[in-house]
């Protein structure tokens, strides 16, 4: 983890071109987008009729997908380019039920106990420890008793992340907080959540993802993504 940087130091990395690339992958439903959606929704319960807060929503993939599945979905992001991209994709995809709002995950623009599910997908790797802790505290506040916090993020022990740390592969400069599944699970429990699940999910790469599916439980080098599900106590 790059301790000297905070989430706010890297915010300029998220410009219109950053979200345009993600929006293009989503609209084409390429292999990356399909696997990403499948991974995240494997962690979620049936979202029909539930209120879902999608934190760090970016161009809106999971807000849109939750709304398609019948959720009351609100995407929240800190940077205006994300919301512009999300609104555009929502129009192009004709998903009128999805809503988006400008906001900081460390101080959510949401009422206390308003949400059934708080989703942080491909977000926590962009957060320093202090901001990550604030996200956990704000998520707990925003969730109804019994509500779920779901985290989906790159796993620090995976081969790709280790190669990035060593400089062999290029690291995304905004990835200042890539953590292990155990670190994530410990953090949510310290914040008063009841851990429901820690699992590892595969990449979109053919062949390689078969190895990840089969051996990730035993081989940390094959843990491409960590998935954490935790419940706010009743």
Image (tube, helix red, strand yellow):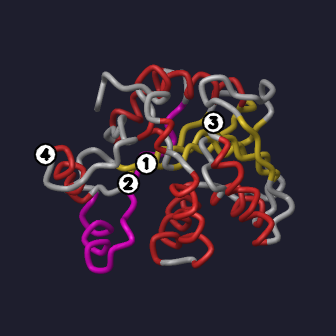
The answer to whether the residue labelled 4 contacts the one labelled 1, judged by CB atoms less than 8 Å apart, is no
Q: Is residue 229 magenta?
A: no
Q: Write down the residue under mark 3.
A: 78
> Is 27 placed above or below 87 here?
below
Q: Is residue 28 left or right of residue 156?
A: right
In the image, residue 10 sits, relative to residue 170, either above or below, namely above
| Magenta region, residue range | 194-216
Label 2 environment density (alpha carbons within 10 Å; few <14, some 14–19, many ≥20) = many
Element marked by disc 3 = loop
Residue 225's label in the rendered image is 2
Query: Closer to the N terminus: mark 2 or mark 3?
Result: 3
Residue of label 4:
166
The reply to whether callout 2 and callout 4 are in contact (CB within 8 Å) is no
Q: Which mark's residue is nearer the viewer, 3 or 1?
A: 3
Q: Nearer the viewer, residue 19 or 49?
A: 19
Secondary structure of residue under mark 2: strand
């Amino acid at each position: 983890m790059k301790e000297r940087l905070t989430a706010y130091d890297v915010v300029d990395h998220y410009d219109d071109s950053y979200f345009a690339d993600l929006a293009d992958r989503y609209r084409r439903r390429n292999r990356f987008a399909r696997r990403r959606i499948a991974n995240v929704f494997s962690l979620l319960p049936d979202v029909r009729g539930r209120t879902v807060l999608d934190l760090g929503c970016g161009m809106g993939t999971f807000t849109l997908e939750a709304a398609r599945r019948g959720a009351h979905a609100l995407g929240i992001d800190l940077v205006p380019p994300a919301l512009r991209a999300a609104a555009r994709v929502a129009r192009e995809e004709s998903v009128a039920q999805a809503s988006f709002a400008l906001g900081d995950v460390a101080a959510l623009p949401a009422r206390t106990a308003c949400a059934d599910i708080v989703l942080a997908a491909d977000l926590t790797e962009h957060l320093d420890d202090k901001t990550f802790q604030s996200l956990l505290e704000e998520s707990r506040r925003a969730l109804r008793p019994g509500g779920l916090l779901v985290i989906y993020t790159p796993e620090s022990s995976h081969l790709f992340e280790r190669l990035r740390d060593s400089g062999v592969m290029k690291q995304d400069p905004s990835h200042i907080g890539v953590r292990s599944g155990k670190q994530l699970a410990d953090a949510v429990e310290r914040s008063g959540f009841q851990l429901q699940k820690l699992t590892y999910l595969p990449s979109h790469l053919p062949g390689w993802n078969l190895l990840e599916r089969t051996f990730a439980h035993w081989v940390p080098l094959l843990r491409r993504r960590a998935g954490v599900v935790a419940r706010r106590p009743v």
